[in-house]
Image: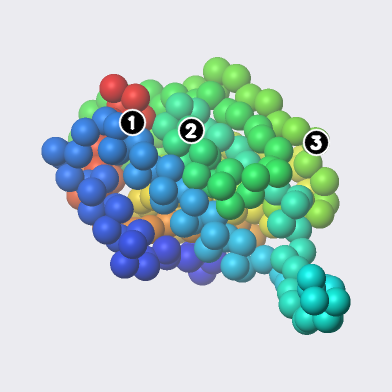
């Protein structure tokens, strides 16, 4: 399964603060930025590398590596909740082109945990995606996976080199649902929680990331 857990001690420390109901809006938003940077670095570490030789200031040659495709990144911001996460991702990929999707899922309470959520797309715009591009879809919460699947459907004509999902928390069900339909998508998340409740929220989760980040 193309699932990568960013479970370093620092990432887990930040996630613990995000889960805490007493974490205020400013710290919550800043922590999303911090995790975006860490997740971005982990994504970069999985990209193809090639050996290069450079000349140092001492006129001496040194062998090193270059990450292929580091300058060919497209970040898709699932607004509004992903905006701080994208700010962090841009620290890792400063030259990335950006796309946006304004999405809102229809809230409600069901008799049992929903298998999917209805998602309204109010606006979307993507840059021209080339075959050598790496596309990162940023959404802090992957619950049923419905929003990510909607974005991937919107991008179905794009032929990128690789697709990634950058998230803070995911549910096991959401991860399985995405990888079943799109096995080539790599999901990066700090933690995978076991449950979804009757309102479609991840449990134990951290609440509504957009509301907590933007009040």
Local SS, label 2: helix
Residue shown at 60% from the left, 20% from the top? 123
Above or below, comparing residue 39 to residue 122 in the picture: below
* Mark 2, residue position: 83
Label 2: few (<14), some (14–19) or many (≥20) C-alpha neighbours in 10 Å? many
CA separation, marks 1 and 2?
9 Å
* Mark 3, residue position: 128
CA separation, marks 3 and 2?
21 Å
- Closer to the N terminus: mark 3 or mark 2? 2
Local SS, label 1: helix
* Mark 1, residue position: 213
Residue shown at 35% from the left, 44% from the top? 31
Which residue is more in the foreground, 207 or 32?
A: 32
Residue 24 seen from this side:
yes
Image position, residue 188 (x, y; %): 49, 58
The mark found on residue 29 in the picture is none
Label 3: few (<14), some (14–19) or many (≥20) C-alpha neighbours in 10 Å? few
Residue shown at 29% from the left, 22% from the top? 215
Left or right? Give the position of 96 relative to 58: left
Local SS, label 3: loop
Name the residue furthest left. Answer: 22
Image position, residue 150 (x, y; %): 56, 36
- Closer to the N terminus: mark 1 or mark 3? 3
Residue shown at 43% from the left, 43% from the top? 33
Above or below, comparing residue 68 to residue 82 in the picture: below
């Amino acid at each position: 399964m193309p699932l990568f857990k960013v479970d370093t001690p620092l990432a887990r420390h930040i996630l613990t603060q995000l889960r805490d109901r007493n974490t205020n809006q400013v710290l919550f938003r800043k922590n999303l930025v911090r995790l975006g940077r860490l997740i971005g670095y982990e994504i970069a570490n999985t990209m193809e590398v090639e050996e290069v030789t450079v000349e140092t200031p001492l006129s001496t040659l040194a062998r090193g590596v270059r990450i292929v495709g580091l300058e060919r990144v497209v970040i898709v911001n699932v607004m509004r909740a992903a905006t701080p996460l994208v700010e962090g991702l841009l620290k890792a990929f400063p030259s990335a082109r950006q796309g946006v999707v304004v999405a809102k899922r229809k809230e409600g309470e069901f008799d049992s945990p929903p298998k999917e959520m209805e998602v309204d797309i109010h606006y979307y715009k993507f840059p021209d995606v080339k075959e050598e591009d790496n596309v990162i879809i940023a959404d802090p919460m992957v619950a049923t996976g419905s929003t990510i699947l909607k974005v991937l459907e919107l991008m179905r004509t794009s032929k990128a080199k690789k697709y990634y999902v950058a998230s803070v928390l995911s549910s096991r069900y959401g991860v399985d649902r995405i990888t079943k339909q799109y096995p080539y998508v790599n999901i990066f998340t700090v933690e995978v929680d076991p449950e979804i409740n009757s309102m479609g929220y991840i449990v134990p989760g951290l609440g509504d990331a957009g509301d907590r980040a933007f009040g």
